[in-house]
Each structure stands twice: as C-alpha cells, then as structure tokens.
Image (cartoon, rainbow, N blue to C red):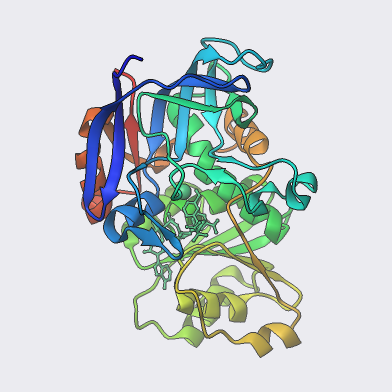
Amino acid sequence: MASDNLTAVLYKVNDLRLEKRSIPEPEDHEVLLEMGSVGICGSDVHYLVNGAIGDFVVRAPMVMGHEASGTVAKVGKNVKNLKVGDRVAIEPGVPCKTCEYCKHGRYNLCADIIFCATPPCHGNLCQYYTHSADFCYKLPDHVSMEEGALLEPLSVGVHACRRADVKLGSTVLVTGAGPIGLVSMLSAKAMGATKVIITDLAQNRLDLAKDLGADYTVLLNKDSNEKAIVEQVHQLLGKEPDKTIECSGAESSIRIAIQATKSGGVVVVVGMGRPEATVPLVNALVREVDIRGVFRYANCYPLALEMIASGKVDVKKLITHNYTLEETLAAFETAKTGAGGAVKIMIHCKK
Ligand code: NAD
Ligand code: 572
Ligand code: ZN
C-alpha cells in the first residue's frame, strides 16, 4: 500500500508528530477522501496540552482533527450518494444506527458513536482518510472547503439554538465569544433572533462578535460582579433575554445565565467546564427557567450547509490564521498561545 499519507498524530502530552502513514482503502459503505481543510478545535488543543478530557484519555497515538472537508478520491461498492471528485463536508461522528437513540434521531447520544479525534478514535488531520459516505455532505461549487470544515462548529451552534428553541423575535444572551459562542450567535440571528447580546473577557473577541452582527457586547473581567452584569444585560437589551446560550465553560457564566434569563425562558449549556458547578438552582426552578444540556449535534449538517450556501450566514470571518498540513506543529503552537488574536485556525491539507 502506498505510504504517502502525511498525518498529524498525537502521541502523548505535548508530543504531536507529522508522520507518513499508508493510504486506507474504503470499505463498501465508505469513501476515500483527499482531505481539504481541517479546523483546529479547542478539544484538539486540550488533548495536546492535557492528554485527556474527562474520562477520554489519549492512551495510544491518536490522529487529530474533526472539523473537516475533503474531495472524494474513491468510492466503496455500495456507495450511491457520492462520486469521485465530489467535494464534501465530513460529519465526524458516525453512530451505530441501531440503538434507541439512533432510531429516535438523537444519534449524538449513541453510546457507540465513533467520533473523530475523541480517544480511542482517530481524526482526519491527514492527506487521505476514509469515512462513512452517508456522513459526508456534498458541497455546492460556491461553498469553499474552509466553509465545509466550518460546518462542524456551526452545527454545534445550530443544535444549541434548536435546543433553546430560538425563533423569530427571540432575544438571546450568549456567554463566551469563542468560536462556539460566535457560531451560536450567528445561528440565533439566522433563526430569527432580533436581539443578541454577547459577553467575553477578551475585547478582540467581542470586536469580532460585533463585526459578525452582535447587537450588544459586554466586556467582563474575572472579578466582575454577577448582579451588576445581570443588570447591565437587562439594561442594554431593555428587557430580559428569552434564551441564554452558555459557551464559555465558566461557572460564573452559568450563574449569570440563569439569573439573567426571563421567567419561563431557556438556558442551554454548551460550555464544558468543571464537572460540578454551584448554580442558583432554586432561582431557576421557581421561575421555570429550563436548563438544557447540549452534546455536539444531530441532524444539523443539512441546515448548517443551507445557512452557508444561501448566504444567510458568513462563517469565513472566524478564520484568523491559515497553515499547510506541513506547518501543523506551528498551527498548534498558535492555537495553544492564542498569539495574534487567534480565533479559528485552519489547516489546508491539499498541496
Ligand atoms: P474558547 O475557549 O475558544 O471560547 C471560550 C470563550 O469564553 C473565550 O473567548 C473566553 O475568553 C470566554 N470566557 C471565559 N470565561 C468567561 C466568562 N466568565 N464570561 C464570559 N466569557 C468567558 O472555546 P470554544 O471553542 O468557543 O468552546 C466553548 C466551550 O464549548 C468549551 O467549553 C468547549 O469545550 C465547549 N463545547 C461543547 C460542546 C458540546 O457538545 N457541549 C461542543 C463544542 C464545544
Ligand atoms: O466539535 C465537537 C466538540 N465537542 C466538544 C468540544 C469540542 N468540540 N465537546 C466538549 C467535550 N465533550 S466530552 O463529552 N468528550 C471529550 C467526549 O467531554 C464532548 C463535546
Ligand atoms: Zn470540536
């Protein structure tokens, strides 16, 4: 088998290597993809720096990358939906399709899901990679490979807004203006939110949020007074938000989210911080503020693609840095330090 498949492999903490691996053969239901663009996600950086996220521990070398697009280079014999040359976005989680959750369409909750770059499963930061054809979405000619890769985080935003039941006229608070807060804000706007306010500790991220369409921004610092922030949010909006989408992972943000949200409203928690948090639960209970979890997404790629293809949402501005596959180590160094105001770093795998 040819072994000219340059691949980014995480061996252990702070030991990321580029190595040549063999080009895999697609199974009957799979396609072989020549990889296009792969975004670096916060989770990739977390595995690099800590070797684990919660119970998911890198115990064996793992290929990085799960925000990806590619071009079909070969098709398995049972593949009907794609042909050689098709450009596709790759949905990184392939579920079992037979469990109760899969059958009810909530396949993100499948216990046997194989999700790229979540140990022990390999990701797709490489030149050639095989994937289930039915988790690949053909891109129209005018949608770029970078946008195809960004369908992944955008799908998290779409799922968060669906969980929050964002609709025409919603007023939305987003806490945290990292890539996930920003795609949640873009999704909320696209789904009809008329006012979106977003918080962060970093002014450059709030500036980008404003550029992307945030109506109001709130700069916080670690010592900001909780009650004063809630007041400020209400004052800027002129009302209480119907929905809050927590995207920072900070306990203080969950506390603010609950207190700021209107009675009868919804708080969705996307940010993954410490496993346990102290939150004003009774405040939420007596005001019937629903607190809902978010775990990745299910059935969101088609809508995320429509949002981009129709021009309703522009995700390209999230990309602050570009690297080639050969420059992967430098790309991860930038992701680790956040140098140059890095938000989304994109790696281009095709020569
Ligand atoms: P990120 O670290 O780039 O962004 C987080 C942002 O929150 C940063 O800009 C940071 O300055 C800001 N922040 C930190 N503390 C804050 C505070 N107290 N108030 C307001 N803002 C604060 O991460 P990201 O890639 O945007 O992801 C956001 C979170 O979502 C992470 O915790 C990540 O693990 C999680 N995530 C969850 C899912 C899921 O399925 N639930 C999916 C993807 C990401
Ligand atoms: O794009 C998917 C994604 N999911 C993230 C983070 C970044 N990107 N999640 C946060 C971490 N969890 S987890 O349950 N886990 C490591 C499987 O703690 C998944 C969702
Ligand atoms: Zn991710």
* Residue extending furthest toward the top: 84
Give x and y (percent) for residue 265.
72, 71
| Residue 194 visible in the picture | no
Give x and y (percent) for residue 50.
30, 61
Q: Quadrant of residue 316?
A: top left
Q: Quadrant of ligand 1?
A: bottom left
Q: Quarter of the image for the C terminus: give it.
A: top left
Give x and y (percent) for residue 258.
61, 78
Q: Give the answer, above or below, for where 201 lies relative to 312.
A: below
* Residue at image location 46% in from the left, 33% down from the top: 68
* Residue at image location 63% in from the left, 12% down from the top: 77
Q: Quadrant of residue 95?
A: top right
48 with respect to 273 (left or right): left
Give x and y (percent) for residue 56.
44, 59
Q: Give the answer, above or below, for where 346 lies relative to 254.
A: above
| Residue 143 visible in the picture | yes
Q: Quarter of the image for the N terminus: give it.
A: top left
Q: Give the answer, above or below, for where 49 lies relative to 284.
A: above
Depth check: 65 or 170 in front? 65
* Residue at image location 44% in from the left, 48% down from the top: 120
Depth check: 78 or 327 in front? 78
345 with respect to 123 (left or right): left
* Residue at image location 37% in from the left, 34% down from the top: 125
274 with respect to 86 (left or right): left
What is the number of callouts on the image? Answer: 0
55 with respect to 342 (left or right): right
